[in-house]
Image (cartoon, rainbow, N blue to C red):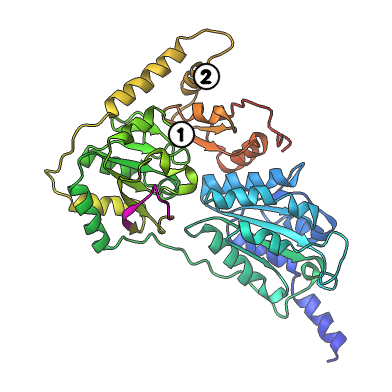
Amino acid sequence: MGIDGAMESRSTDTEDVARLLVRCLRAEGVEYVFGIPGEENIRFVDALNGSGIRYVVVRHEQAASFMAEIYGRLTGRAGVCSATLGPGAINLLLGTADATTNSTPMVALAAQGSLRRIHKESHQVIDLVSMFAPVTQWAARTECPDAVPEMVRKAFKTAQSERPGAVFLAVPEDIEAEHPTEPLAPLQIDTVRADAPSPSQIARAAEVLTSARRPVVLAGHGAARADASAALVRFAERLNVPVATTFHGKGVFPDDHPNALGAVGFMRHDYSNFGFDAADVLVCVGYEIQEFDPVKINPNGDKRIVHLHRFPAEVDAHYPVAVDVEGDPAQSLDALAAVLPESLTYEPGTGEQIRTLLHEELRYGHDNDAFPLVPQRVVADVRTALDRHDIVLADTGAGKMWMARVPGLRAEHLPDLQRPVHHGLRTARRDRRQTRPAGQESPGNDG
């Protein structure tokens, strides 16, 4: 058979890269792709028809990136966004960077000019991989049709493994139209199981807590991702210790629990920060330094820290880790509680006073009919209107700090893009109501 015959046979016996890519996305459990079609990715968009994946068309690619991010944050599965080459791809950059800094799984797909012209100056062709590399866990360009199943599997595995984040894949327009050398299938998904902590590290952490006088627990975003709510409650009740959360960790510990301190991390010295003033040991569960600067809870850097997370702590002068326990946060909490003496008790802290202050503030807002509305009234009304498992989307500004006051709700913060985030949330959590108070006009309200 001649070369022409071989190429003809290859094109008729195998699907093109666009359809193979969609099949791989489907195998990863993708339900939605948020984006805007373009000439260079039109085959991919067409292949989504009838695939079972819904293509959600937006007005701006930046909105698509934030929709994908909030989908990933709420489901734990990578949200997917797509754009055409050049300016379209560049517009995905902000949401992609935000997903990585917020430890949120996301896969961004973009078209690229053909391989025949990317080596030279050409219309709307820029080095997208180099642009996205600093703000992603992995950035790559597809240059071989046969590599598609491997690259898609690697993209989702990288995005969804701890520490989760964004991945970027560029698909040149000529590669999208080509066919693999033989029929290919999506790769098998290898599920990562929660890992148990090291017994020796648990023993070291127990020594720290045994000698502590007034420990405080801080639960962060990693605790929420690990679904460590029940373990946190067990740990708090076993040791009778107070528990605060970061804003991204809000909801992982019940705000109406008698050990709850509320959310910390925004104001320099808020009510909840008082609980840390007299603490000598901080048990940080799934806390990530990017959530807020630890100087706010350890200004002198003199508190001993037990860090429980799936990966090591970042280095910071105000976050001196005495013991770093790597493993599943829920398993680590249970293992630590199991080895501590039953008779262990601690000095009383300021938790009850803090809860009283927060309750009085909520009551003040509930009874306040002043106009314009005081923030406490908004907090009280939001609490009255929504159930425990409903969600508040908080815009940038003072509003996010007041929404952190709302007891018993999960709060999500994304900067200045409430409407597209709202749409992304609806695809991920149709079973939950949401509210999105805004203190300013959001420039990205064009989802």
Q: Nearer the viewer, residue 180 or 333?
A: 333
Mark 1 Cα-neighbour bin, 10 Å: few <14, some 14–19, many ≥20: some
Position in image of residue 41 (x %, y %): 79, 59
Label 1 sits on residue? 389
Q: Nearer the viewer, residue 194 or 319?
A: 319
The three-letter code of the residue at mark 2 reads Pro
Q: Start and end of the magenta stretch?
A: 315-324
- Residue 181 vertical position relative to residue 209 in the rendered view, above or below: below
SS at badge 2: helix
Q: What is the quadrant of residue 438 in the picture?
A: top right
Position in image of residue 314 (x %, y %): 44, 55
Instruction: Evaluate whether residue 167 shows in this view.
Output: no
Position in image of residue 431 (x %, y %): 53, 36
Instruction: Evaluate whether residue 203 shows in this view.
Output: yes
Q: Residue at x 67, y 70 (%)?
A: 148
Left or right relative to 46: residue 197: left
SS at badge 1: loop
Say whether residue 319 is magenta. Answer: yes
- Residue 103 vertical position relative to residue 248 in the rendered view, above or below: below
Say whether residue 266 is magenta. Answer: no
Numbered tag placed on residue 375 in the rendering: 2
